């Protein structure tokens, strides 16, 4: 094209012609690509709700209703927390997915481990198993795990997504300032080391002016309240067991609540640890007492742990975990579905 123009009108006309030609070239290239590389169909994504639980018609329809409803539950938290909550949070941000009581003929389906139907047919399905605390289920194609050190990860069939933080958590009362009087354990009675339930340990705490609030399964309604808590203590055993199937939830909740945590040498905690301010790891009862004394006496250290915890909590907020689920589907599950079934338009 000759770009030597005698006046601005000729120049303008030439520019418009060139732009029009460029536009048609782009459209032509796009059409050619579509013929050579057909667009892949996005499979439907389903979350399976076990119909032996509460009817799907009676379940909350949005995340706000879910939060209020969930706080009144006394059992079966796993399926509702992992399946229903994840579905509602994804729908809230506009991510396409469905909640179903029936196994579809094809697509991607997310199923909680304990909800797996008997004789599940997987001919045209990509099955995602939310493993939680259970062992692998053979028919699953991918396992969503709550611990990045689990066996599914080692076999390259697992994908780590943190468990959602405690719903409705009440943080520590800032008015307590530097008080250090109350230790908290929340969880099943069997999940607290026997040494920490002994009269001898209780006596040592009493000598330090510390009370130990053990909220076992008969007090689940109190698990969310950290308002008067000064430190979290959560150790399953002192035998070196890494508990590769357990999550770091107690650490997450401590960060959100603004409370230091004294924890055992579990792999989930260790995987989250970036600095000594994330939590205090101990391997004996003597180590527990030493950590308690340090937190009680070194107020500057305790404040630094709390400040650091608030920063770390930002990474495991519901919004951040929702994004991780989206990335899982877009970058892992959907590509694996196409690889497995080669579904093209």
Image: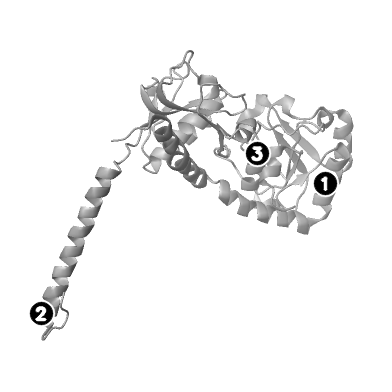
Let me know if residue 84 appears in the view: yes
Estimate the spatial distance between the alpha carbons at disc 2 and disc 1, rounded to whole Å: 82 Å
The quadrant where residue 283 appears: top right
Between 78 and 334, the one lying in front of the other is: 334
Between 283 and 192, the one lying in front of the other is: 283
The answer to whether the residue labelled 2 contacts the one labelled 1, judged by CB atoms less than 8 Å apart, is no
Mark closest to the chain's N terminus, 1 or 3: 3
Residue 248, numbered label: 3
Estimate the spatial distance between the alpha carbons at disc 2 and disc 3, rounded to whole Å: 70 Å
The quadrant where residue 29 appears: bottom left
Name the residue beneath numbered marker 1. 291
Relative placement, left or right, of 204 versus 228 is right
Tell me the crowding category of disc 1: few under 14, some 14 to 19, or many 20 or more residues within 10 angstroms, Cα based: some
Relative placement, left or right, of 34 versus 335 is left
Mark closest to the chain's N terminus, 2 or 3: 2
Query: For the residue labelled by badge 1, is the local secondary structure a helix, a strand or a loop?
Result: helix
Residue 258, numbered label: none
Between 179 and 28, the one lying in front of the other is: 28
Residue 10, numbered label: 2
Q: x, y percentage for residue 139? A: 51, 21
Q: x, y percentage for residue 80? A: 50, 28
- The vertical placement of 284 against 124, above or below, is below
Mark closest to the chain's N terminus, 2 or 1: 2
Q: x, y percentage for residue 339? A: 42, 34
Between 55 and 181, the one lying in front of the other is: 55
């Amino acid at each position: 094209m000759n770009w030597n123009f005698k006046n601005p009108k000729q120049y303008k006309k030439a520019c418009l012609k060139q732009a029009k030609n460029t536009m048609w070239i782009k459209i032509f290239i796009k059409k050619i690509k579509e013929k050579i590389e057909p667009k892949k169909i996005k499979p439907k994504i389903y979350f399976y709700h076990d119909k032996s639980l509460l009817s799907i018609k009676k379940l909350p329809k949005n995340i706000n209703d879910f939060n209020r409803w969930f706080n009144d539950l006394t059992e079966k938290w796993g399926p509702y927390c992992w399946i229903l909550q994840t579905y509602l949070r994804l729908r809230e941000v506009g991510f396409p997915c469905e909640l179903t009581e029936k196994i579809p003929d094809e697509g991607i389906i997310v199923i909680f481990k304990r909800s797996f139907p008997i004789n599940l047919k997987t001919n045209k399905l990509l099955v995602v198993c939310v493993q939680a605390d259970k062992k692998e289920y053979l028919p699953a194609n991918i396992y969503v795990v709550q611990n990045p050190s689990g066996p599914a990860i080692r076999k390259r069939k697992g994908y780590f997504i943190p468990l959602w933080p405690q719903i409705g958590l009440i943080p520590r009362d800032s008015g307590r300032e530097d008080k250090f009087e109350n230790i908290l354990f929340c969880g099943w009675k069997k999940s607290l080391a026997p040494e920490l339930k002994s009269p001898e340990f209780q006596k040592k705490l009493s000598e330090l002016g510390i009370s130990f609030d053990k909220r076992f399964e008969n007090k689940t309604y109190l698990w969310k309240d950290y308002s008067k808590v000064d430190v979290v203590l959560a150790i399953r055993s002192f035998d070196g067991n890494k508990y590769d199937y357990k999550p770091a939830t107690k650490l997450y909740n401590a960060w959100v609540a603004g409370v230091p945590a004294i924890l055992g040498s579990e792999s989930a905690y260790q995987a989250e640890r970036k600095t000594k301010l994330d939590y205090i790891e101990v391997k004996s009862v003597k180590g527990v007492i030493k950590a308690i004394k340090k937190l009680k006496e070194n107020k500057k250290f305790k404040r630094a742990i709390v400040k650091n915890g608030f920063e770390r909590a930002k990474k495991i907020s519901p919004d951040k975990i929702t994004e991780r689920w989206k990335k899982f589907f877009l970058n892992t599950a959907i590509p694996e579905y196409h690889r497995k079934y080669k579904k093209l338009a």
